[in-house]
Amino acid sequence: MSVEDHLLRIPGPTPIPSSVQQAMSKPMIGHRGTETKALLQRIKPKLKTIFGTGQDVLMVTASGTAGLEAAVVNSTSPGDTVLVLVTGAFGERFAKICENHRLHVIRHDIEWGKAVSPDVIQEYASKNPGIKAVFATFCETSTGVLNPVKELAEAVHSHTDALFIADGVSAVGGTEVKMDEWGIDVLVTGSQKAMMLPPGLTFLAVSELAWRIIEKNRNRPFYLDLVKYRDKLADDSTPFTPGLSLFMGLEQVLNLVEEEGLTKVFNRHHLMKEMTRAAFHAMDIPLLTNESDSSPTVTSVAPADFNPEQLRKQVKSDFGLDLAGGQQHLKGKIFRIGHMGYCSPADVLQTISLLEIGIQKLSKRDVIGKGTMEAQKIYLEWT
């Protein structure tokens, strides 16, 4: 295997299109100059479409976790009561951020691999009428669960006066979201997932309701003060020096999405999910999530007769295929396949074919061709 052979199929960071790489290699420009102002003017309307919002989408040079923290510290104050819906490692992260900022955190923990039911909102609201915000993950990257954020938002606004805040880091750009229509008050994502960029940018969209609360908050941070970003973006600028190369790459990402068509982008992700799931069903290898809870961007596989970590090492050594393992108590029990962003059905077929070889080596079961054939059938039926 060549040292340059690297098939990145983890749920972030994800592969980057060559045209995006080229865009990020353009000569540097002044971050207060007319070129940057024009760049932001071109980016702003296209970002709104992906988020399903009429609001400007804020761009912060920071990680996705910084976006989650920004959502917490701008919309709440120490001592506020908040409800965190924990369906995996990143729901857990939301809870830890809230606790770190001295909020009164009520947790609703779900078995990892299952989605949260909107029915729980009414129960918590009746017992805790002062809830200020409800936090949830859209796609729980650690398990491959897609939570029903539309229904969760509806339940929050039906039974509480709270804000509904969603971590969309491994969802936005890979599955449909209608932030305004669904009633999501703050939606966060990161650059390194379905947005097809390197790590380094976090994006936040904020509803009118959330802005009214944020504007009154006297505990807003300095660098992550969302009002600063909103006001500067209205003037096609940023409050601090941005990651300009990432902005240049972002423009090309948005061009690629526009060229493919957003509906086709979402359909492609759902097709890749169905191909991946069908392949493992055909090989009689269990999946962590059921069909209704499954994400179009990441699939978690929970094999019963071979070690997931050994499989990851095997296919990495043989083919340079990079898969993700389980987190926390799922470490050593699952492996995760990312199929988002710069990824196609052809990439899924390649990944399944290579995994069949690795699985046959480890389990001694005859799986060669079974998963690939089923994935091919799904592709042909779909198209």
Image: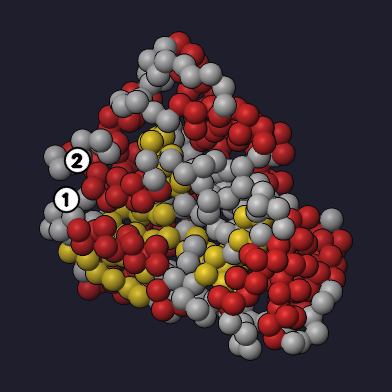
Rendered image quadrant of residue 237: top left
Q: Residues within 10 Å of mark 2 (few under 14, many from 20)?
A: many
Sequence-wise, the earlier of marks 2 and 1 is 1
Asked if one can make out residue 224 in the rendered structure from this viewpoint, the answer is yes
Residue 110 location (% of width, % of height)? 40, 76
Residue at 59%, 77% (x, y): give it.
310
Residue farthest to the front, as pictured: 2
Residue at 47%, 16% (x, y): give it.
29
Q: Which amino acid does label 1 sit on?
A: Ser
Kindly report the distance in space between the C-alpha atoms of the residues bearing marks 2 and 1: 9 Å
Q: Name the residue under label 2.
A: 220
With respect to residue 249, does 217 lie above or below? below
Q: Looking at the figure, which quarter contains the C terminus?
A: bottom right
Rendered image quadrant of residue 378: bottom right
With respect to residue 352, does 233 lie above or below? above
Q: Residue 77 carries which label?
A: 1
Q: Residues within 10 Å of mark 1 (few under 14, many from 20)?
A: some
Q: What residue type is labelled 2?
A: Arg
Q: Is mark 1 on a helix, strand or loop?
A: loop
Q: Is mark 2 on a helix, strand or loop?
A: loop
Question: Does 302 sit left or right of 223 as displayed?
Answer: right
Residue nearer the viewer, 286 or 205: 286
Question: Does 296 sit left or right of 378 as displayed?
Answer: left
Question: Does 133 sit left or right of 297 as displayed?
Answer: left
Asked if one can make out residue 131 in the rendered structure from this viewpoint, the answer is no
With respect to residue 161, does 205 lie above or below? above
